[in-house]
Image: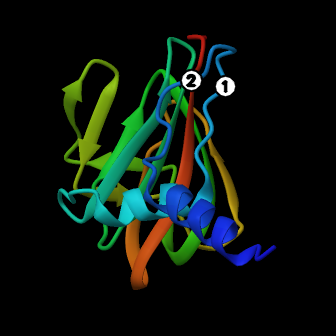
Amino acid sequence: MNFRWPVALTTLLLLTMPAQAGADRFGVTYVPAPQGRAQIEKAAQRDGSAVLDFARNANHSVLLVRRTKPGRAEVHTALTDVWYVIDGSGMLVTGGKATDAKAIAPEELRGSGISGGIARHIGKGDIIDIPAGVPHWVSKIDGKELVYLTVKVATPKR
């Protein structure tokens, strides 16, 4: 029996299926790497970034982010961000004070940059834990893009 045809058909079906954005009956969300990558590359960009929201509940959310240019400084006063860099590299500034910060939603601020923070070069494989209330800003993208997974965790107020 020729096994090439079933393998080719299965591969084609997997590559054309949309990433599962909803949880299964056990609450598990699964997004195969090729589908996540294809979706983030096709996603509409706004201000040089595209974001796919794969899971969201009261305690956490899971986002896939693709940046092709620097963004705005962010401060999430009630959410801790945990990043895992999937591809690309750039400069991440954390801490200090967000410049010209304005509220865009409850407990969400955006600014034009950061003063007094720490600049770090980040790249593929890096893990970054940004506590709630700490300003952070991707100030530079090396090459064409920076792709990372963000898990946002609700942080109790102190």
- What's the amino acid at mark 2? Ala
Q: Is residue 56 above or below residue 49?
A: above
* Quadrant containing the N terminus in the rendered view: bottom right
* Quadrant containing the C terminus in the rendered view: top right
**In the image, 38: left or right of 46?**
right
* Nearer to me, 102 or 150: 150
SS at circle 1: loop
- Asked if labels 2 and 1 touch by Cβ distance under 8 angstroms, the answer is yes
Q: Which residue shows up at 49% across the image and 73% down it? A: 91
- The image position of residue 101, as x and y in percent, is 23, 41
Which of the numbered marks, if any, corresponds to residue 61?
none
- The image position of residue 44, as x and y in percent, is 21, 57
Q: Which residue shows up at 63% across the image and 38% down it? A: 30
- The image position of residue 145, as x and y in percent, is 41, 76
Q: How many marks?
A: 2
Q: Which residue shows up at 24% across the image and 65% down it? A: 48
Q: Is residue 95 above or below residue 115?
A: above
Which of the numbered marks, if any, corresponds to residue 23?
2
Q: Residues within 10 Å of mark 2 (few under 14, many from 20)?
A: few
Q: Residue furthest bottom?
A: 143
* Nearer to me, 118 or 34: 34
- The image position of residue 50, as x and y in percent, is 31, 56
Residue 7: quarter of image: bottom right
Q: Earlier in the sequence, mark 1 or mark 2?
A: 2
**In the image, 16: left or right of 107?**
right
How far apart, in angstroms, are the residues tagged by discs 1 and 2?
5 Å
- What's the amino acid at mark 1? Val
Q: Residues within 10 Å of mark 1 (few under 14, many from 20)?
A: few
SS at circle 2: loop
**Residue highlighted by disc 1:** 28
* Nearer to me, 100 or 39: 39
* Nearer to me, 1 or 38: 1
